[in-house]
């Protein structure tokens, strides 16, 4: 957990630099020991694909993550797809030991739309060998403190209102679950 946290903070520092905002800003809003916050490590388990499930069936529906960033680890079964700028879903080839970085809704707001939240989904594979395997993935969802006020610090500042991070995410949870 500590390693995941430090890696994500290194990424946030780089993102802050890219956005030309104070390097410390994101770090101050993601203090690990301060609660409450929605930062979570989730281990996901997808059973083998039932025979009658058509290839391409969504096993995890098209969505964006809600927080700042997500570090995603997938196994060799694959099935993850991310949307490119042209609005097409692109298959993400699993790469051993690679970490996929997804940008979330709150980062999109903070960056005034520069770092658009990544739309992604998981679909059932076609390969019969892969369909028989269990799929596992690990997602480390990085969220700011509940009390953080997220407002655009770069990009198109007029496009996004300022929101309280805790309320913003609680509201999405209430609508999706
Ligand atoms: O299982 C995956 O690879 C993706 C899971 C995911 O997108 C999520 O839990 O938000
Ligand atoms: Fe996701």
Image (tube, rainbow, N blue to C red):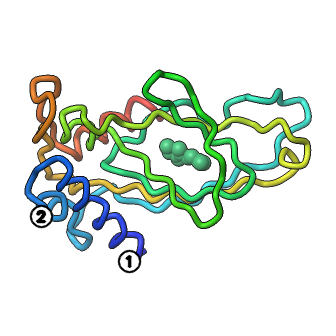
> Do tag 2 and tag 1 residues touch (Cβ < 8 Å)?
no
Q: Residue furthest bottom?
A: 2
Q: Residue 2: give its label.
A: 1
Considering only vertical position in the picture, is 133 above or below 118? below
56 with respect to 117 (left or right): right
15 with respect to 148 (left or right): right
In space, the residues marked 2 and 1 are separated at their CA atoms by 19 Å
Residue 6: image x %, image y %? 33, 73
The one of 135 and 164 positioned closer to us in this rendering: 135
Q: Quadrant of residue 57?
A: top right
For image coordinates 17% across by 59% down, the residue present is: 29
Helix, strand or loop under label 1:
helix
Residue 71: image x %, image y %? 45, 57
Considering only vertical position in the picture, is 132 above or below 152? below
The one of 167 and 120 positioned closer to us in this rendering: 120
Considering only vertical position in the picture, is 161 above or below 98? above
Q: Residues within 10 Å of mark 2 (few under 14, many from 20)?
A: few
52 with respect to 150 (left or right): right
151 with respect to 113 (left or right): left
Q: Which residue is mark 2?
A: 24
Residue 51: image x %, image y %? 91, 35
């Amino acid at each position: 957990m500590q390693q995941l946290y430090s890696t994500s903070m290194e990424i946030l520092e780089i993102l802050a630099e890219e956005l030309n905002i104070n390097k410390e800003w994101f770090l101050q809003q993601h203090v690990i020991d301060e609660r409450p916050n929605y930062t979570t490590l989730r281990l996901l388990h997808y059973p083998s694909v039932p025979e009658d499930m058509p290839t391409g069936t969504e096993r995890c529906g098209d969505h964006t993550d809600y927080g700042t960033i997500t570090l995603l680890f997938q196994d060799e079964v694959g099935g993850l797809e991310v949307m490119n700028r042209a609005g097409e879903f692109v298959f993400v080839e699993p790469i051993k030991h690679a970490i996929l970085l997804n940008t979330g809704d709150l980062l999109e707001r903070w960056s005034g739309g520069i770092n658009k939240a990544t739309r992604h989904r998981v679909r059932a594979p076609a390969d019969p060998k892969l369909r028989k395997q269990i799929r596992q993935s690990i997602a480390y969802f990085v969220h700011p403190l509940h009390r953080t006020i997220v407002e655009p610090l770069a990009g198109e500042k007029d496009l996004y209102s300022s929101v309280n991070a805790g309320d913003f995410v609680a509201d999405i949870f209430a609508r999706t679950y």
